[in-house]
Amino acid sequence: MRKQYIIIFLLLFFCSTAFAAAGGSYGVEFLKLKAGARPLGMGNAYTAIASDASTLFFNPAGLAQLSFPEILTMQNKWFLELDHTVVGAVYPIPQGVLGISYSGLSSGDIQGYDQNGSATSLFNTSSSALCLSFGQRINQMLSVGLGLKTVSEKLESNAASCLALDLGVFLQPSANYSLGASILNLGSGLTYITENTPLPTSLNVGGAVYSKLFDEDITIASDLNLYSDSTILNIGAEYTMQNFLSLRAGYSGGLFHTGIGLRANLFSFDYAYFDQAYLGQTHQFSISILFGEADRAKKLIIENLSLGKAYFEQKQFAAAMLKFEKVILLDPKNEEARRLYYQAQISLEKLDFENVYLEIKAQEGRSVEEILASGKKYMLQKNYLEAITLFSRALVLEPTNIDALRLQSEAQSKMESQLISQAKEEARAYLGEAMKFVTVGKYKDALVQINLALAKEPKNEQALQLKRKLETILKLEKK
């Protein structure tokens, strides 16, 4: 199977390289403009990211990762009174995911002059691309995509148009990283009267890594855009807090990018900023709309269930349990998530037992000092359960060892503090979800989250006060 992935990426590479080598210089520069304030804020490092409709403009294979209908709109003022308009929509069907996108660039009125330098009539210019795309999963890890677009340009009374192709592959062998490659704007070019203008065909390859920072999601991505006359390196990062606020930064072609994103219910608002050295500052705004609140919940269920399965296959059972737990919170009747949660829990307990057993076996025949040294290493790693097990082993060999007694007591105390701290963190997370439900008037759902918070931290005063208020509101609603 790995050979198939390598072959697909190599085909994309050689196909694009061969076309670029024949291209030389090109026109239709507006096709190099990227769309979506989220990827712009990340320095256009988006070929290997496929979590919203912006993938329409970077990699058509990313469409296959989207589960629900979505609309993306963007309207921006560029340099010299240029208007840039972007609209994209995706719609899943049984065979895959369809997408349609439009990108247009138009100027304001431009004063014309004749060959003698005398003013003539006003005129304007415009460029546009309309693309129909399709993405499909080949298997759980690999997706492919295709886009057919029509490209048009108008300069005063002269106009030209042509067809072009977008091709892409998307590979996610792990929940922790993904890879992507695409060829964009593959076509013969525009012909004005007798002169042909090649399109800016590009090969784009990229990777993205998904991790945690302070228990919040962080994504780091990098792209390489290869044109016939230039190469652009894009690097970007996104840090998302409480699945609501995203902070972004990136670097693209010598320019630093920054941006933020806000997500609430069906809508997401994104902003990006970067400063052109000679042409001035640019501000990009885009809005995404996800259809149906139930669809949004389903999307989160599918995403977390898929990530949980991926973690489970990699034997990262603790991470898998967290994802399955999120699914159960969104859909308490989801039997698959419950079954997988308990399987992951049993597997984690078995793995911990095996590790401790192997560690104990490894300690047999070793001195008390050596066992204590191993236990101290676990203490530094905050693996207090393993440390306690080793200190207990040392005490079996030497019951009156003062160091072993002290270290065992210290490890037990720190493990208790760790569990209490973890419970408080989980309670705060549930409380945050409850507040979101309160703001939209979903008091029953808020009460469910409050009860989950109190199950983790029974004496949480804020949760207790909010619970009393919610119970009063619900009683009044019944009357």
Image: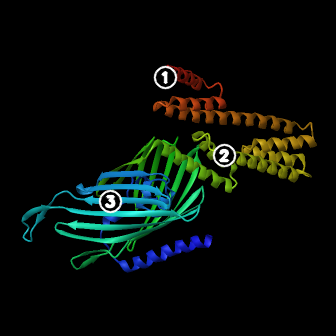
Examine the rendering and report whether any part of residue 282 can be seen: no
Quadrant in which residue 108 is drawn: bottom left
Query: By what rule are the colours in the image chosen?
Result: rainbow
CA distance separating discs 2 and 3: 42 Å
Q: Measured from the top left, where is residue 31 in percent x and y?
A: 34, 65
Residue 262 x %, y %: 43, 43
Of tags 1 and 2, which is closer to the observer? 1
The residue wearing badge 3 is 103
Q: Which residue is mark 2?
A: 321
| Residue that label 1 marks | 477
Image spot of residue 309 (x, y percent):
64, 53
Q: Is residue 360 left or right of residue 449?
A: right
Report if the CB atoms under discs 1 and 2 are less than 8 Å apart: no
Of label 1 and label 3, which has the lower sequence position? 3
Local crowd size for mark 1, using a 10 Å CA cut-off: few (<14), some (14–19), many (≥20): few
Q: Nearer the viewer, residue 43 or 189?
A: 189
Q: Is residue 418 visible?
A: yes
